[in-house]
Amino acid sequence: MATIQRVKTISEFHRTRNLPPPEHPLISVVNYADVRLTQDDKGNSWVYDFFSISLKRNIGGKIRYGQLEYDFDEGIMFFIAPGQVFSIERDGVVTGERSGWMLMIHPDFLWNTSLAKSIKQYEYFSYTTHEALFVSKKEEDTLKGVIENIRQEYHANMDKYSQNIIISQIETLLNYSERFYNRQFLTRKKANHQLLDRLEEKLTDYFKSHELISKGLPTVQYIAEALNASPKYLSSVLKMLTGQTAQQHIHEKLLERAKEKLTISEVSISEIAYELGFEHPQSFSKLFKTKTGLSPLEFRQSYQSN
């Protein structure tokens, strides 16, 4: 029976993967080829109490996060935050030599640094593994150089400068990753535009159905799940393509529908608010005015006077 195994410390990770003890208890870089899984691990899931940033090739199986999976035969990065559950499904088929690296950072290492708070702003820690980062050879070499700087710094005798130097290198790694993700949003235009098309179709169907009355406005979480995407990834793609987040797209579709009802029907503002999924007409009127600069009644009157 599958279980969720919690790994509390980096030292525990090293021990369970038959690795030598880490040179520093709060940060470690390991070669992926040295990490060993056992048959007992098959079908189990893990949750770490630390951050994990990895670049892996030829895993010989699949990484599963939630209900989604991705085959890691190619060189792909993924990011796991403390508390996220994931699993590895091994099929025993390895098309080449396993390679790559894993950077593990315990939150205590970041304590009292600017990165302790800012690391939460990197949205790709909330992406699922099928939204992983594909890196080119040149990009991979760039990231490897940063990882080597981190490794060398904690291999050396740690002094009062070491933590700040390592923190700055981690920030460099995260910023490069964010840049490469933005590149990926642009280079994978076809897939991303298909995602945008599916979003528009989903919102149109939702706003034309009775779900608005029964369920209210769709949430970003609901729409993302319907599109087989994580909320953060969906918003990131949309922001890159359109300049708007997923929440803003939902509001735009709402306003589009509201304006249509205000101009072609004579039903009351309260009834329109109800049909659009609002429990209180005042909430609808407030959102409409915030977005358009006019109240629903003012918009209707301005349209009728033209």
Image (tube, rainbow, N blue to C red):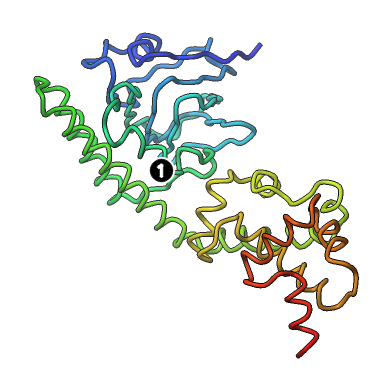
Residue beneath the point at 73% across and 76% down:
299
> Compared to 8, does 151 lie above or below?
below
Residue beneath the point at 73% across and 75% down:
298
- Indicate the quadrant containing the C terminus: top left, top right, bottom left or bottom right: bottom right
- Indicate the quadrant containing the N terminus: top left, top right, bottom left or bottom right: top right
In the structure shown, which secondary structural element does the residue marked by tag 1 occupy?
Answer: loop
* Front residue of 172 and 32: 172
Count of numbered badges drawn on the protein: 1
Which amino acid, by three-letter code, is at mark 1? Tyr
Residue beneath the point at 43% across and 20% down:
49
Q: Which of the 4 image quadrants contains residue 62?
A: top right
Q: Which of the 4 image quadrants contains residue 159?
A: top left
| 238 sits to left or right of 164 | right
Instruction: Provide the residue designation for mark 1.
Output: 122
* Front residue of 177 and 232: 232
Q: Position of residue 165 (x, y in %)?
A: 16, 34
Q: Which of the 4 image quadrants contains residue 257?
A: bottom right
- Mark 1 crowdedness (10 Å alpha carbons): few <14, some 14-19, many ≥20: some
Q: Position of residue 30 (x, y in %)?
A: 29, 24
| 284 sits to left or right of 38 | right
Q: Position of residue 283 (x, y in %)?
A: 72, 55
Q: Position of residue 75 (x, y in %)?
A: 39, 41
Residue beneath the point at 30% across and 50% down:
139
> Compared to 7, does 56 lie above or below?
below
